[in-house]
Amino acid sequence: MIQHTSPPLLALPAELVYQILTYLPSTSVAQVSQACRLLRSHANDDKLWHRLVQENVPGVRLTSPSPCRNFKELYTAHHPCWFVPRNKLWFSDNHHTGKLIIARYDPRRGCIEAYRLVAEHGGHTSEVWAWNDDVIIHTFAPKVQLWLDDPVLKLDLGSFGSSGGRTQKEVRMETGSAAQGIYSVFLFARQIPPSLQDNSMMLWPPRILPANQRVRNDSQDHFRGSGHKPQTLAQVSDTTFRIRKWMEFTSLGQPASVRMGEDVTTFSTLPEECYTPTKEKPWQGIWVGDYSGHGCEFLVILQPDTGGRPPLSRVSSTSSSLSFVSARTEMSGEDTSMAGEEQAEEADDEEDIYKGRLEAIKLTGDPNVPRGEYTFIAEDIGRRGLIRVADEPIFKNARVVKSIGHIAGRFFEDDKYIPSQLIMISHDRLAQYWE
């Protein structure tokens, strides 16, 4: 007689089975539910799916699955888009200017949405610099807020429908104004394995930015080909996505509409640890810069563990590479006075945070220096890069270090690096003197 024995897993108390299932991703939990009736019961435990949803909505404490009946239904409705609110901050490859958006989950309507982050100058002052009376210092107090009039992204509970093939779908979104003939759809992006990436590829995000995954951001068929769309869940990039936007016009008496002005925007996120300030790296983070006539622009300041990285431009530029070397040489050739050495020792005794390299990269840009480019680099904010400690009232006790600024003509022509000075006023305020 054949004796049937239950697997050891089924003999465990329900609490232990639940604990084991919490270590599994959602796709594995779904597979477990297909094994047998008992495991299906365990895998359908709504506390488990509540946890899976909650992990993807930072800053929101969910107490109810409403407007869905349960958390499993809610999770399934937006799968596999939960990476959008989980990563929160996204920046785009819009030509020259780029765009910065903040994504979130709205528990009232059960939708995933994202709005543009904008900055205004706020209060603005100017005064002659006591250290160099040929220079006018401009200060500003930026006002940063979400532009809530129109979402950039909006995925409702029923956006994907009930049919399969979600990874290849283009999902219509209720953004813009259909009455004005403006439409948009959401697309998943297919990640490019590092082994297949080469310098000839147009990738997003740019290589100067840290990223866990990169995708193509150039396509002759506007990313309609199957090679650009993930065929399986494993090919879906959870750090990038795309939005296709276009306009449609219908003439009176004509049944068909004319589609025009199509544009595809690729969005990417940054590893959170790269822009989260720490005790050792207090300057890294998302900053707002005043770029005069161009207005406010967002940039990320990085404090990488290793330095010496060459400037990589969106378009290969021999002149910028040469000017980078020239500017570095010119700055390194400057002498540091004895007074500066003494000030360096005093400053170093006070804090041990002044060390290493600081890089500022534009997340939004302008027609001169666009998004995805360096705006300035300080090779060493420690003793080797110190110029002086400011004693003029406006920058009193601020550390002034050697830096290199990135400038260019209209449409990023003739870009080059020039010597500059970075004035480190505090952990949340910097000034850049373009020599």
Image (spheres, grey):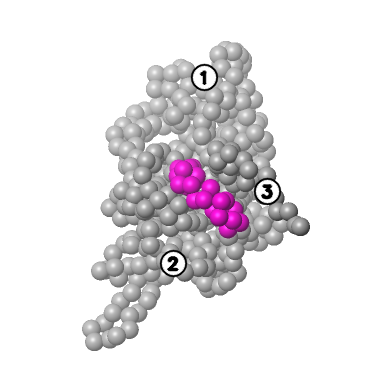
- SS assignment at label 3: loop
- The residue carrying pointer 1 sits among few (fewer than 14), some (14 to 19) or many (20 or more) residues within 10 Å by Cα, namely many
Residue 190 x/y as whole percent: 58, 61
User: What amino acid is labelled 2 in the image?
Assistant: Ser
- Specify the segment rendered in magenta: 32-55
Q: Nearer the viewer, residue 265 or 297?
A: 265
Q: Measuring 67% from the left and 49% from the top, which residue is drawn there?
A: 6
In this rendering, position of residue 61 left or right of residue 9:
left
- SS assignment at label 2: loop
Residue under label 2, please give it: 162
Residue under label 3, please give it: 7
Q: Nearer the viewer, residue 27 or 362?
A: 27
- The residue carrying pointer 3 sits among few (fewer than 14), some (14 to 19) or many (20 or more) residues within 10 Å by Cα, namely few
In this rendering, position of residue 26 left or right of residue 175:
right
Q: Measuring 52% from the left and 51% from the top, which residue is drawn there?
A: 41
- The residue carrying pointer 2 sits among few (fewer than 14), some (14 to 19) or many (20 or more) residues within 10 Å by Cα, namely few
